[in-house]
């Protein structure tokens, strides 16, 4: 729990049961929001991850190994995913047509 929220609950004389109810509700909403974001973005993540894999070599491995390459790959994948999210899905004219 947020220590600031506990202090504010004491200042406004919020009953402990009401405070705990609000804290649980906030935690469930927060977790649910992140889970739903992951659920809705799963297709985009899969497309971005598969689209630029290095080719397999003769031993069946993809690219060079090592812990450094794992971190570089994670950073590269994250940047590619964020670039994909920045692209406009529809143009302004189409948005106006859909909202009319």
Image: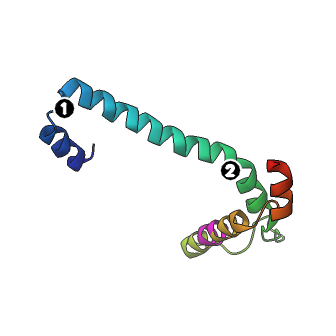
Residue 44 appears left or right of 25: right
Q: Position of residue 52 (x, y in %)?
A: 79, 68
Residue 13 placement: quadrant: top left
Q: Which of marks 2 and 1 is nearer the N terminus?
A: 1
Q: Where does the N terminus fall, quadrant-wise? A: top left
Q: Name the residue under label 2.
A: 41
Q: What element carries label 2?
A: helix
Q: Which residue is nearer to you in this view: 92 or 34?
A: 92
Q: Which of 38 and 5 is in front in this view?
A: 5
Q: What stretch is highlighted in magenta?
A: 73-78
Q: In this view, does 21 lie to the left or right of 17?
A: right
Give the label on residue 75, or none.
Answer: none
Q: Which residue is found at the position 35% from the left and 31% from the top? A: 24
Q: Could you tell me residue 69's position as x and y percent? A: 61, 74
Residue at left 71%, top 55%?
45
Q: Does the magenta stretch include residue 55?
A: no
Task: Give residue 99's position: percent from left, percent from top.
Answer: 79, 49
Q: Is residue 91 visible?
A: no
Comparing 54 with 66, the one in front is 54
* Crowd around label 1: few <14 · some 14–19 · many ≥20 (10 Å): few
């Amino acid at each position: 729990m947020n220590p600031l929220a506990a202090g504010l609950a004491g200042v406004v004389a919020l009953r402990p049961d009401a405070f705990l109810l609000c804290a649980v509700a906030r935690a469930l909403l927060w977790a649910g929001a992140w889970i739903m974001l992951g659920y809705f973005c799963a297709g985009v993540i899969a497309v971005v991850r598969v689209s630029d894999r290095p080719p397999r070599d003769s031993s069946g491995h993809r690219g060079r190994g090592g812990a450094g390459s794992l971190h570089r790959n994670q950073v590269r994948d994250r940047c590619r995913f964020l670039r994909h999210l920045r692209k406009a899905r529809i143009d302004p004219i189409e948005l106006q047509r859909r909202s009319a």
